[in-house]
Image (cartoon, rainbow, N blue to C red):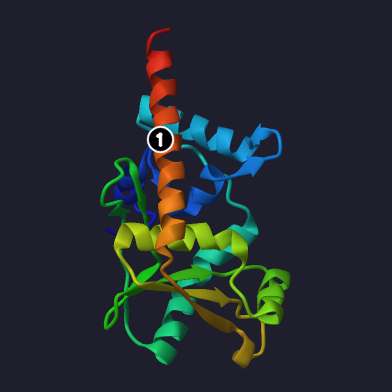
């Protein structure tokens, strides 16, 4: 199934996905974060209407989408063949899943491609570490697809050739995945409860 196709959007409708796991686990000192609440509203709305929520895409986001194939090709030249994949349902938690950016052909791993703006890419090159905000997404992909690892890719074509592509392997962390799974189960229960209450109105 091609990512960003109509079929792919339908497959994800009303489900917790890897790219939004950070919203599910977002907390503030006073309790529930706005991003978590907004995501709950989105999933409730998608399930009640059967239509995907409209999301805003700015130029930087569109650039990222447009550059993804270039990044995948460069990765393949250095590290080996990658298959594009669709949506993986979580093996035990209904209404949740993930869409990795690719699966390694000769290994049990996936890839996650980010094509950030220049300053973000520079920051990653300087720190030589995967930005922490992507760790929940990457670990959730492993939980859903059964991968042992995910290669995180940061790509920006405006840098000198040797600095355009940065790759770092993230290994599966089962203890952390278990924490994420508990949070997702709780969140999905809240979605179900909200829908039940609305249907009684």
Is residue 67 in sight in this rendering? yes
Position in image of residue 7 (x %, y %): 29, 48
The quarter of the picture where residue 130 lies is bottom right
Instruction: Tell me the quarter of the image containing the N terminus.
Output: bottom left
Seen in the image, is 152 located left or right of residue 86?
right
Which residue is depicted at the point 64% across and 80% down? Answer: 128
Position in image of residue 167 (x %, y %): 52, 81
Which residue is depicted at the point 52% across and 71% down? Answer: 67
Q: Where is mark 1, residue-wise?
A: 188
Instruction: Tell me the quarter of the image containing the C terminus.
Output: top left
Position in image of residue 157 (x %, y %): 60, 80
- Residue situated in front as seen by the camera: 95 or 189: 189
- Residue situated in front as seen by the camera: 82 or 124: 124
Number of other residues with Cα within 10 Å of mark 1, as a class: few under 14, some 14 to 19, many 20 or more: many
Is residue 86 in sight in this rendering? no
Which residue is depicted at the point 47% across and 37% down? Answer: 53
């Amino acid at each position: 199934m091609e990512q960003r196709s109509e079929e792919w959007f339908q497959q994800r409708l009303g489900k917790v996905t890897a790219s939004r796991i950070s919203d599910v686990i977002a907390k503030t000192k006073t309790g529930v974060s706005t991003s978590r609440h907004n995501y709950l509203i989105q999933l409730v709305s998608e399930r009640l209407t059967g239509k995907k929520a409209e999301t805003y895409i700015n130029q930087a986001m569109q650039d990222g989408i447009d550059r993804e194939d270039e990044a995948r090709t460069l990765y393949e030249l250095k590290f080996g063949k990658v298959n594009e994949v669709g949506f993986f349902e979580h093996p035990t938690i209904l209404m949740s899943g993930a869409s990795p950016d690719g699966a390694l052909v000769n290994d049990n791993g996936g890839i996650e491609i980010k094509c950030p703006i220049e300053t973000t890419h520079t920051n990653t090159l300087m720190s030589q570490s995967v930005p922490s905000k992507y760790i929940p997404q990457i670990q959730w992909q492993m939980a859903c697809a059964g991968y042992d690892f995910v290669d995180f890719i940061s790509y920006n074509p405006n840098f000198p050739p040797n600095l355009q592509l940065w790759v770092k392997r993230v290994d599966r962390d089962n203890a952390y995945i278990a924490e994420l799974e508990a949070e997702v189960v709780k969140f999905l229960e809240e979605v179900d409860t909200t829908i039940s209450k609305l249907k009684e109105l």
